[in-house]
Amino acid sequence: MIESRLLLATTNRGKIRELKKLLLGLPFKIESLDKYPEFGRYRETGQTFEENSRGKSLFYSRSYPGLVLAEDSGLEVEALDGQPGVYSARFSGSRATDEKNIRKLLRLLKGVPWPRRRARFVCVASLAKQGRIVKCFRGSVSGYILNEPDGRNGFGYDPVFYYPPLKKSFARLRAEEKNRVSHRGKALEKVRHFLAASWQRQS
Ligand code: ITT
């Protein structure tokens, strides 16, 4: 076995729920940041998902004695020139909530016709260990921004993200359905392959 502990370096409950499911079956004890308040909090300053993702995993890997998995993700909307992008979590300001972010997004897209409401979710996941990046993995998924929220599952922008192949918003999908097609699901599939291959090489 390579490492027996893996830290999920995120404070977002929605991400934690999905990541735990996506890592099931791997030979790691999965831990989360709640257990380690002494590590402090990483402040995101990067201009790209990759910069933030690397920054987060490196930051926590300097304190944690095992493998660290961080991810930076967000929504890029064509009609808004890729906004909110790396600002997805803070789109509506320093006291942002999912509801406020969605309200702002729908206000900006008011009157924008369907073809121009194309958007994609992007996820860059990074593995780091003791102050060094091990590898980064990317996943994305395309869809359209609805005129109003639909569905109650998931988190973040899921209620307004319509996924054409399943003819549903992400908030109408079950967790397993979303994980099969989502940006995070795709990036984590690559993480799983990488970890499984490393484990085989070392055992
Ligand atoms: P951590 O940095 O602690 O991981 P965060 O929520 O601040 O938590 P990000 O900076 O990566 O994480 O911001 C991601 C935001 O993008 C998230 O808060 C949502 O608004 C949006 N987002 C990402 N993945 C999403 C998904 O699967 N469904 C809906 N919204 C998503």
Image (cartoon, helix red, strand yellow):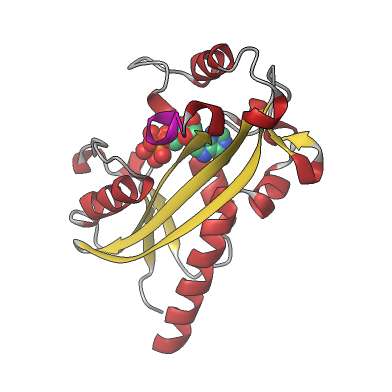
Report the residue at 38% width, 69% height from top: 4
- Give the residues in magenta: 82-88
Between residues 129 and 72, which one lies in front from this camera angle?
Answer: 72
Quick check: 181 above or below 42? below
**In the shown orientation, is residue 158 left or right of residue 27?**
right
Question: Which corner quadrant holds the N terminus?
Answer: bottom left
Residue 80 horizontal/vertical position (percent): 49, 26
Q: How many marks?
A: 0
Does the magenta portion include 86?
yes
In-image side of 50 versus 26 (left or right) = left
Q: Position of residue 176 (x, y in %)?
A: 70, 49
Who is closer to the viewer here, 163 or 31?
Answer: 163
Whether residue 13 appears in this view of the structure is: no
Residue 4 versus residue 197 in the image, above or below: above
Q: Position of residue 184 (x, y in %)?
A: 54, 50
Residue at 29 percent across and 40 percent down: it is 47
Q: Is residue 133 above or below residue 2?
A: above
Identity of the residue drawn at 59% across and 36% down: 119
Corner quadrant of residue 35: top left
**Residue 159 percent coordinates (x, y):** 66, 26
* Residue drawn at x 68%, y 43% as measured from the top left: 175
Q: Is residue 83 magenta?
A: yes
Residue nearest the viewer, comparing 103 with 179: 103
